Amino acid sequence: MFDQLNNRPADSLLALIKAFQADDRTGKIDLGVGVYRDAMGRTPVMRAVKAAEQFLLETQDSKKYLGPEGDLQFVQLLKPIVFGKSPKVDHRLVGIQTPGGSGALRLGAELIQTANPSVKVLLGTPSWPNHAPIFSSAHLAVKDYAFVDLTLQQVKFDSVVDALSSAAEGDIVLLHGCCHNPTGIDFTIEQWRQITELLVARRLVPFIDLAYQGLGDGLEQDAAPTRMILDAVDEALIAYSCDKNFGLYRERVGALYVMTRNNDDIGKAESNMAALARVNWSMPPDHGAAVVRTILESPEMSAMWRAELDEMCERVNGNRAALAAAAPDLAFISRQRGLFSNLSMSRERAAALRAKHGIYMADSGRMNLAGMQPADAGAIVTALRAEGCLK
Protein backbone atom coordinates (compact mmCIF):
# COMPACT_ATOMS: atom_id res chain seq x y z
CA MET A 1 0.00 0.00 0.00
CA PHE A 2 2.64 2.54 0.99
CA ASP A 3 4.54 2.09 -2.26
CA GLN A 4 1.82 4.28 -3.76
CA LEU A 5 2.74 7.29 -1.59
CA ASN A 6 4.84 10.19 -2.83
CA ASN A 7 7.18 12.16 -0.60
CA ARG A 8 5.81 15.47 0.62
CA PRO A 9 8.05 18.54 0.98
CA ALA A 10 9.26 19.23 4.50
CA ASP A 11 7.52 22.01 6.42
CA SER A 12 9.60 25.11 5.73
CA LEU A 13 9.18 26.59 9.22
CA LEU A 14 10.28 23.35 10.90
CA ALA A 15 13.33 23.32 8.62
CA LEU A 16 13.99 26.92 9.69
CA ILE A 17 14.08 25.86 13.35
CA LYS A 18 16.69 23.20 12.63
CA ALA A 19 18.78 25.57 10.52
CA PHE A 20 18.79 28.21 13.26
CA GLN A 21 19.77 25.66 15.91
CA ALA A 22 22.62 24.39 13.75
CA ASP A 23 24.00 27.89 13.14
CA ASP A 24 26.90 28.48 15.57
CA ARG A 25 27.29 32.22 14.89
CA THR A 26 26.90 34.38 17.97
CA GLY A 27 24.97 37.24 16.33
CA LYS A 28 22.16 35.17 14.81
CA ILE A 29 18.57 36.41 15.22
CA ASP A 30 15.49 34.18 15.10
CA LEU A 31 12.50 35.87 13.44
CA GLY A 32 11.05 32.57 12.26
CA VAL A 33 8.56 30.42 14.14
CA GLY A 34 5.67 32.39 15.68
CA VAL A 35 6.11 32.06 19.43
CA TYR A 36 6.47 34.82 22.00
CA ARG A 37 9.95 35.36 23.45
CA ASP A 38 10.89 37.48 26.44
CA ALA A 39 13.87 39.81 26.90
CA MET A 40 16.08 36.76 27.56
CA GLY A 41 15.00 35.08 24.33
CA ARG A 42 12.97 32.45 26.16
CA THR A 43 9.36 31.33 25.71
CA PRO A 44 8.57 31.14 29.42
CA VAL A 45 5.74 29.45 31.25
CA MET A 46 3.56 32.29 32.55
CA ARG A 47 3.46 32.81 36.31
CA ALA A 48 -0.32 32.45 36.32
CA VAL A 49 0.00 29.13 34.49
CA LYS A 50 2.53 27.86 37.03
CA ALA A 51 0.18 28.85 39.86
CA ALA A 52 -2.74 27.07 38.18
CA GLU A 53 -0.69 23.94 37.56
CA GLN A 54 0.38 23.86 41.20
CA PHE A 55 -3.26 24.16 42.25
CA LEU A 56 -4.24 21.32 39.92
CA LEU A 57 -1.38 19.17 41.17
CA GLU A 58 -2.67 19.52 44.71
CA THR A 59 -6.40 19.26 44.06
CA GLN A 60 -7.09 17.28 40.88
CA ASP A 61 -8.32 13.83 41.92
CA SER A 62 -9.16 12.17 38.59
CA LYS A 63 -8.05 11.92 34.98
CA LYS A 64 -11.32 10.46 33.70
CA TYR A 65 -12.80 11.47 30.34
CA LEU A 66 -14.81 14.67 30.15
CA GLY A 67 -16.56 13.79 26.87
CA PRO A 68 -16.11 15.07 23.31
CA GLU A 69 -17.24 18.57 24.34
CA GLY A 70 -14.27 18.84 26.70
CA ASP A 71 -14.18 21.21 29.66
CA LEU A 72 -17.40 23.19 29.25
CA GLN A 73 -16.61 25.43 32.21
CA PHE A 74 -13.44 26.49 30.37
CA VAL A 75 -15.58 27.22 27.30
CA GLN A 76 -18.06 29.20 29.40
CA LEU A 77 -15.46 31.27 31.27
CA LEU A 78 -13.82 32.38 28.03
CA LYS A 79 -17.07 33.80 26.66
CA PRO A 80 -17.09 37.18 28.48
CA ILE A 81 -13.42 37.73 27.62
CA VAL A 82 -14.03 37.08 23.93
CA PHE A 83 -17.60 38.28 23.43
CA GLY A 84 -18.19 40.75 26.23
CA LYS A 85 -21.51 40.82 28.07
CA SER A 86 -24.02 41.11 25.25
CA PRO A 87 -27.12 39.03 26.22
CA LYS A 88 -28.20 39.07 22.57
CA VAL A 89 -25.02 37.27 21.50
CA ASP A 90 -24.57 35.07 24.57
CA HIS A 91 -28.00 33.40 24.29
CA ARG A 92 -27.23 32.28 20.72
CA LEU A 93 -23.70 30.97 21.32
CA VAL A 94 -22.65 27.36 21.79
CA GLY A 95 -19.04 26.29 22.25
CA ILE A 96 -16.87 23.21 22.41
CA GLN A 97 -13.26 22.68 23.50
CA THR A 98 -10.81 21.86 20.69
CA PRO A 99 -7.12 20.95 20.35
CA GLY A 100 -5.87 24.47 19.70
CA GLY A 101 -7.14 27.03 17.23
CA SER A 102 -6.26 24.66 14.38
CA GLY A 103 -8.62 22.06 15.81
CA ALA A 104 -11.34 24.72 16.04
CA LEU A 105 -10.82 25.68 12.41
CA ARG A 106 -10.96 22.06 11.26
CA LEU A 107 -14.05 21.29 13.32
CA GLY A 108 -15.74 24.43 12.02
CA ALA A 109 -14.84 23.49 8.44
CA GLU A 110 -16.38 20.04 8.88
CA LEU A 111 -19.49 21.55 10.47
CA ILE A 112 -19.87 23.85 7.46
CA GLN A 113 -19.36 20.94 5.08
CA THR A 114 -22.02 18.94 6.91
CA ALA A 115 -24.50 21.82 6.87
CA ASN A 116 -23.92 23.22 3.38
CA PRO A 117 -21.17 21.55 1.31
CA SER A 118 -21.74 23.78 -1.73
CA VAL A 119 -20.66 27.05 -0.09
CA LYS A 120 -17.36 28.74 -0.88
CA VAL A 121 -14.87 29.95 1.70
CA LEU A 122 -13.56 33.43 0.89
CA LEU A 123 -9.94 33.77 2.01
CA GLY A 124 -7.92 36.98 1.81
CA THR A 125 -4.31 36.47 0.82
CA PRO A 126 -1.71 36.34 2.14
CA SER A 127 -3.08 34.38 5.08
CA TRP A 128 -1.83 31.82 7.57
CA PRO A 129 -0.50 29.00 5.33
CA ASN A 130 -2.65 26.35 7.02
CA HIS A 131 -5.98 28.10 6.42
CA ALA A 132 -6.55 26.97 2.83
CA PRO A 133 -5.40 23.35 3.43
CA ILE A 134 -7.72 22.99 6.43
CA PHE A 135 -10.79 24.02 4.44
CA SER A 136 -9.74 22.09 1.35
CA SER A 137 -9.17 18.94 3.42
CA ALA A 138 -12.76 19.29 4.63
CA HIS A 139 -13.82 19.27 0.94
CA LEU A 140 -14.82 22.92 0.86
CA ALA A 141 -14.08 25.18 -2.11
CA VAL A 142 -11.70 28.02 -1.24
CA LYS A 143 -11.84 31.27 -3.21
CA ASP A 144 -8.86 33.58 -2.76
CA TYR A 145 -8.85 37.34 -3.08
CA ALA A 146 -6.06 39.87 -2.56
CA PHE A 147 -6.14 41.26 0.99
CA VAL A 148 -2.87 43.18 1.30
CA ASP A 149 -0.36 44.87 -1.00
CA LEU A 150 2.96 43.93 0.64
CA THR A 151 4.90 46.48 -1.42
CA LEU A 152 2.74 49.31 -0.07
CA GLN A 153 2.08 47.52 3.26
CA GLN A 154 -1.60 48.38 3.22
CA VAL A 155 -4.97 46.69 2.86
CA LYS A 156 -6.34 46.39 -0.68
CA PHE A 157 -9.76 47.34 0.57
CA ASP A 158 -11.34 47.65 -2.88
CA SER A 159 -10.42 44.00 -3.45
CA VAL A 160 -11.98 43.02 -0.12
CA VAL A 161 -15.20 44.88 -0.95
CA ASP A 162 -15.35 43.38 -4.44
CA ALA A 163 -14.88 39.84 -3.08
CA LEU A 164 -17.64 40.17 -0.49
CA SER A 165 -19.97 42.00 -2.87
CA SER A 166 -19.75 39.20 -5.43
CA ALA A 167 -20.11 36.32 -2.96
CA ALA A 168 -23.23 34.18 -2.92
CA GLU A 169 -25.66 34.13 -0.01
CA GLY A 170 -24.43 31.72 2.67
CA ASP A 171 -20.77 31.81 1.60
CA ILE A 172 -18.19 31.79 4.39
CA VAL A 173 -15.79 34.71 4.94
CA LEU A 174 -12.63 33.84 6.89
CA LEU A 175 -11.55 36.88 8.93
CA HIS A 176 -8.57 37.39 11.27
CA GLY A 177 -10.10 38.92 14.39
CA CYS A 178 -6.92 40.84 15.26
CA CYS A 179 -3.12 40.69 14.85
CA HIS A 180 -3.24 39.38 11.28
CA ASN A 181 -0.95 36.44 10.58
CA PRO A 182 1.31 36.85 8.59
CA THR A 183 1.13 40.59 7.88
CA GLY A 184 0.27 42.31 11.17
CA ILE A 185 -2.06 44.54 9.11
CA ASP A 186 -5.56 44.80 10.56
CA PHE A 187 -8.62 46.58 9.20
CA THR A 188 -9.42 50.00 10.64
CA ILE A 189 -12.60 50.30 12.68
CA GLU A 190 -14.27 52.06 9.76
CA GLN A 191 -13.27 49.22 7.43
CA TRP A 192 -14.61 46.70 9.94
CA ARG A 193 -17.93 48.60 9.89
CA GLN A 194 -18.11 48.40 6.11
CA ILE A 195 -17.26 44.69 6.20
CA THR A 196 -19.99 44.13 8.79
CA GLU A 197 -22.51 45.95 6.60
CA LEU A 198 -21.54 43.78 3.62
CA LEU A 199 -21.84 40.58 5.67
CA VAL A 200 -25.37 41.56 6.66
CA ALA A 201 -26.45 42.85 3.23
CA ARG A 202 -25.08 39.82 1.35
CA ARG A 203 -26.15 37.34 4.06
CA LEU A 204 -22.63 35.95 4.36
CA VAL A 205 -21.37 33.90 7.31
CA PRO A 206 -18.20 35.15 9.04
CA PHE A 207 -15.71 32.61 10.35
CA ILE A 208 -13.46 34.60 12.69
CA ASP A 209 -10.03 33.23 13.58
CA LEU A 210 -9.12 34.86 16.90
CA ALA A 211 -5.70 33.49 17.83
CA TYR A 212 -3.88 36.48 19.34
CA GLN A 213 -6.36 38.34 21.55
CA GLY A 214 -4.49 40.59 23.97
CA LEU A 215 -1.26 40.75 21.97
CA GLY A 216 -2.25 43.71 19.77
CA ASP A 217 -3.85 46.56 21.71
CA GLY A 218 -5.17 44.67 24.75
CA LEU A 219 -7.98 42.19 25.39
CA GLU A 220 -10.90 44.58 24.98
CA GLN A 221 -9.67 46.43 21.90
CA ASP A 222 -8.58 43.24 20.17
CA ALA A 223 -12.06 41.76 20.65
CA ALA A 224 -13.93 44.85 19.40
CA PRO A 225 -14.20 43.83 15.70
CA THR A 226 -15.48 40.35 16.61
CA ARG A 227 -18.11 41.81 18.93
CA MET A 228 -19.18 44.36 16.31
CA ILE A 229 -19.74 41.63 13.74
CA LEU A 230 -21.61 39.30 16.09
CA ASP A 231 -23.95 42.08 17.16
CA ALA A 232 -25.01 42.48 13.52
CA VAL A 233 -25.05 39.08 11.77
CA ASP A 234 -27.41 36.13 12.12
CA GLU A 235 -24.85 33.32 12.14
CA ALA A 236 -21.10 33.06 12.73
CA LEU A 237 -18.27 30.73 13.70
CA ILE A 238 -15.34 31.72 15.91
CA ALA A 239 -12.13 29.70 16.25
CA TYR A 240 -10.32 30.69 19.44
CA SER A 241 -6.81 29.85 20.60
CA CYS A 242 -5.31 30.15 24.09
CA ASP A 243 -1.91 28.94 22.87
CA LYS A 244 -0.45 32.43 22.51
CA ASN A 245 -2.15 34.61 25.10
CA PHE A 246 -1.73 31.97 27.83
CA GLY A 247 1.61 30.68 26.49
CA LEU A 248 0.21 27.14 26.26
CA TYR A 249 1.56 26.29 22.81
CA ARG A 250 2.30 22.62 23.32
CA GLU A 251 -0.87 21.98 25.34
CA ARG A 252 -3.08 22.80 22.30
CA VAL A 253 -5.86 24.80 23.96
CA GLY A 254 -8.70 26.17 21.88
CA ALA A 255 -12.44 26.39 21.40
CA LEU A 256 -14.95 26.60 18.56
CA TYR A 257 -17.97 28.81 19.11
CA VAL A 258 -21.00 28.87 16.83
CA MET A 259 -23.62 31.61 16.90
CA THR A 260 -26.99 30.50 15.53
CA ARG A 261 -29.97 32.52 14.34
CA ASN A 262 -32.27 31.26 17.07
CA ASN A 263 -32.47 28.97 20.08
CA ASP A 264 -33.90 26.12 18.01
CA ASP A 265 -30.64 25.83 16.05
CA ILE A 266 -28.37 25.76 19.10
CA GLY A 267 -29.10 22.15 19.96
CA LYS A 268 -28.56 21.00 16.37
CA ALA A 269 -25.26 22.84 16.12
CA GLU A 270 -24.10 21.46 19.47
CA SER A 271 -24.96 17.85 18.64
CA ASN A 272 -23.19 18.02 15.29
CA MET A 273 -20.10 19.62 16.80
CA ALA A 274 -19.91 16.86 19.42
CA ALA A 275 -20.41 14.12 16.81
CA LEU A 276 -17.70 15.54 14.54
CA ALA A 277 -15.32 15.98 17.47
CA ARG A 278 -15.93 12.37 18.49
CA VAL A 279 -14.67 10.98 15.17
CA ASN A 280 -11.77 13.46 14.93
CA TRP A 281 -10.12 13.28 18.36
CA SER A 282 -12.75 11.56 20.51
CA MET A 283 -11.90 13.58 23.65
CA PRO A 284 -9.79 16.76 23.67
CA PRO A 285 -6.67 16.96 25.88
CA ASP A 286 -7.62 18.25 29.30
CA HIS A 287 -4.58 19.77 30.97
CA GLY A 288 -4.30 23.10 29.14
CA ALA A 289 -8.02 23.82 29.31
CA ALA A 290 -8.00 22.95 33.02
CA VAL A 291 -5.17 25.45 33.50
CA VAL A 292 -7.08 28.23 31.74
CA ARG A 293 -10.26 27.38 33.65
CA THR A 294 -8.38 27.46 36.96
CA ILE A 295 -6.89 30.87 36.12
CA LEU A 296 -10.23 32.36 35.12
CA GLU A 297 -11.99 30.94 38.19
CA SER A 298 -9.50 32.69 40.49
CA PRO A 299 -9.57 36.51 40.73
CA GLU A 300 -5.94 36.49 41.88
CA MET A 301 -4.66 34.25 39.10
CA SER A 302 -6.79 36.06 36.53
CA ALA A 303 -5.34 39.43 37.55
CA MET A 304 -1.83 37.93 37.38
CA TRP A 305 -2.50 36.59 33.86
CA ARG A 306 -3.89 39.90 32.62
CA ALA A 307 -0.86 41.78 33.96
CA GLU A 308 1.53 39.31 32.30
CA LEU A 309 -0.36 39.54 29.02
CA ASP A 310 -0.13 43.34 29.14
CA GLU A 311 3.65 42.99 29.63
CA MET A 312 3.89 40.69 26.61
CA CYS A 313 1.83 43.08 24.48
CA GLU A 314 3.96 46.04 25.56
CA ARG A 315 7.16 44.15 24.74
CA VAL A 316 6.03 43.17 21.23
CA ASN A 317 4.91 46.72 20.47
CA GLY A 318 8.22 47.98 21.86
CA ASN A 319 10.09 45.75 19.43
CA ARG A 320 7.95 47.16 16.62
CA ALA A 321 8.78 50.72 17.67
CA ALA A 322 12.52 49.96 17.83
CA LEU A 323 12.62 48.42 14.35
CA ALA A 324 10.48 51.20 12.85
CA ALA A 325 12.73 53.85 14.40
CA ALA A 326 15.85 52.20 12.94
CA ALA A 327 14.77 52.77 9.33
CA PRO A 328 12.24 55.20 7.82
CA ASP A 329 11.34 52.51 5.27
CA LEU A 330 10.05 50.36 8.14
CA ALA A 331 7.86 53.01 9.79
CA PHE A 332 4.77 50.96 8.88
CA ILE A 333 5.82 48.25 11.34
CA SER A 334 4.95 50.45 14.32
CA ARG A 335 1.38 50.76 13.02
CA GLN A 336 0.89 47.01 12.70
CA ARG A 337 -0.07 44.67 15.52
CA GLY A 338 0.60 41.18 16.81
CA LEU A 339 3.67 39.01 16.48
CA PHE A 340 4.16 39.34 12.73
CA SER A 341 5.04 41.62 9.88
CA ASN A 342 5.52 40.46 6.30
CA LEU A 343 8.09 42.20 4.12
CA SER A 344 7.88 42.05 0.35
CA MET A 345 10.92 40.00 -0.65
CA SER A 346 12.01 37.04 -2.73
CA ARG A 347 12.87 33.58 -1.45
CA GLU A 348 16.45 34.22 -2.61
CA ARG A 349 16.78 37.34 -0.45
CA ALA A 350 15.39 35.51 2.58
CA ALA A 351 18.00 32.79 2.00
CA ALA A 352 20.76 35.41 1.71
CA LEU A 353 19.69 37.01 5.00
CA ARG A 354 20.12 33.64 6.69
CA ALA A 355 23.34 32.62 4.98
CA LYS A 356 25.21 35.95 5.09
CA HIS A 357 23.80 37.67 8.15
CA GLY A 358 22.28 35.03 10.44
CA ILE A 359 18.85 36.71 10.21
CA TYR A 360 16.29 33.90 10.13
CA MET A 361 12.81 34.60 8.77
CA ALA A 362 10.37 32.68 6.60
CA ASP A 363 10.97 32.55 2.83
CA SER A 364 7.79 34.59 2.40
CA GLY A 365 9.35 37.52 4.28
CA ARG A 366 7.27 36.97 7.40
CA MET A 367 9.05 38.12 10.56
CA ASN A 368 8.16 37.16 14.12
CA LEU A 369 8.92 40.43 15.89
CA ALA A 370 8.62 38.80 19.31
CA GLY A 371 11.78 36.88 18.43
CA MET A 372 14.01 39.99 18.43
CA GLN A 373 15.33 42.35 21.06
CA PRO A 374 15.19 46.15 20.61
CA ALA A 375 19.00 46.12 20.43
CA ASP A 376 18.78 43.84 17.36
CA ALA A 377 17.04 46.50 15.26
CA GLY A 378 20.27 47.96 13.86
CA ALA A 379 21.63 44.57 12.76
CA ILE A 380 18.33 43.64 11.13
CA VAL A 381 18.15 46.92 9.19
CA THR A 382 21.80 46.64 8.10
CA ALA A 383 21.17 43.12 6.77
CA LEU A 384 17.96 44.15 4.98
CA ARG A 385 19.75 47.05 3.30
CA ALA A 386 22.71 44.88 2.31
CA GLU A 387 20.40 42.46 0.49
CA GLY A 388 18.37 45.14 -1.24
CA CYS A 389 15.24 44.67 0.85
CA LEU A 390 15.22 48.36 1.82
CA LYS A 391 16.11 51.50 -0.08
Image (cartoon, rainbow, N blue to C red):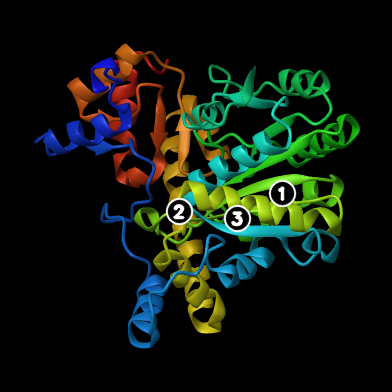
Neighbour tally class for label 3: few under 14, some 14-19, many 20 plus, Cα within 10 Å: many
* Three-letter code for the amino acid on which mark 3 is drawn: Ala
Q: Amino acid at mark 2?
A: Lys
Residue beneath label 1, please? 226
Q: Position of residue 259 (x, y in %)?
A: 76, 52
Check disc 2 and report the residue beneath it.
244
- Which quadrant holds residue 126? top right
Element type at mark 1: helix
- Which residue is under mark 3? 274
Which residue is most to the right? 201
Residue 143 appears left or right of 365 = right
Sooner in the amino-acid sequence: mark 2 or mark 3: 2
Residue located at (37% from left, 47% from top)? 35
Residue 89 appears left or right of 258:
right
284, above or below 35, in the image: below
Q: Nearer the viewer, residue 105 or 325?
A: 105
* Quadrant, the C terminus: top left
Residue at 34% x, 87% y is: 58
Mark 2: few, some, or many residues within 10 Å (few <14, many ≥20)?
many
**Which sits earlier in the primary sequence, circle 3 or circle 1?**
1
Given residues 383 and 10, the one toward you in this image is: 10
Q: Is residue 109 left or right of residue 190?
A: left
Image coordinates of residue 241 in percent, x first then y, are: 52, 53
Answer yes or no: is residue 166 visible.
Answer: yes
